[in-house]
Image: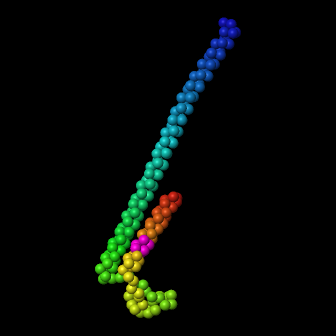
Amino acid sequence: MSNTAKAIAAAVLAAFLFGSGWLVNGWRLGGQHAAELAQRDRQALAVAEQVMAIGRAANAAISTADAKAWKGLEDDKKELRRLRGCVADGTCGVRLIAVQSGHGPSNPGAGSVGHDTVELDPDVQRRVLDHREAIGEDAAKIDYLQDYAAQCWRSTQPK
């Protein structure tokens, strides 16, 4: 065999060995890569489950707060309906307390319906009750939003 043929045979053998080594090493790295990807997938699923659990807990807390706020609004509306009926029947009314010094009734011994009160006409009484209703609803909304904001803030804090 000539030197040229030997050099060609050696080059072919070296290329074959290099190619087979590359192929075997690629398969080995492919297995490691697949194992790393599987581990990352398991970690991502665990994190997703934790996020979903936090979301379910937050939704439950929000639902409870909604039910509480709604019940409070319903109770306030029921009381206002009772007061409106009472005013319409003339069995009760809305009165203003006359204040002389700016520090309360002039006769603290008298109750809220004493001689220092001013009776209002029926239309003004209805408007007072309308304002009371609006203020009560706004206060309930503000309380609800403050509770909601506090719950959101607590859910973001590490435990």
Indicate yes or no whether the magenta region holds residue 132. yes
- Give the overall secondary structure of the magenta segment: helix
- The percent position of residue 52, horizontal first and vertical second, equals 44, 51
- The percent position of residue 32, horizontal first and vertical second, equals 53, 35
Residue 105 visible here:
yes
Residue 154 visible here:
no
Residue 120: quarter of image:
bottom left
Outermost residue, top direction? 1
Residue 159, placed above or below residue 112: above
Over which residues does the magenta segment extend? Answer: 130-135
Q: Residue at x 29, y 80 (%)?
A: 89
Residue 3, placed above or below residue 23: above
Q: Residue at x 40, y 92 (%)?
A: 115
- The percent position of residue 24, horizontal first and vertical second, equals 55, 26
- The percent position of residue 15, horizontal first and vertical second, equals 62, 19
Residue 115, placed above or below residue 3: below
46 vs 56, nearest the viewer: 56
Residue 143: quarter of image:
bottom left
| Colour scheme | rainbow
Residue 26: quarter of image:
top right
Locate the N terminus by quadrant: top right
36 vs 130, nearest the viewer: 130
Q: How many numbered discs?
A: 0
35 vs 122, nearest the viewer: 122
Indicate yes or no whether the magenta region holds residue 149. no
Q: Residue at x 62, y 16 (%)?
A: 13
Q: Residue at x 49, y 90 (%)?
A: 100
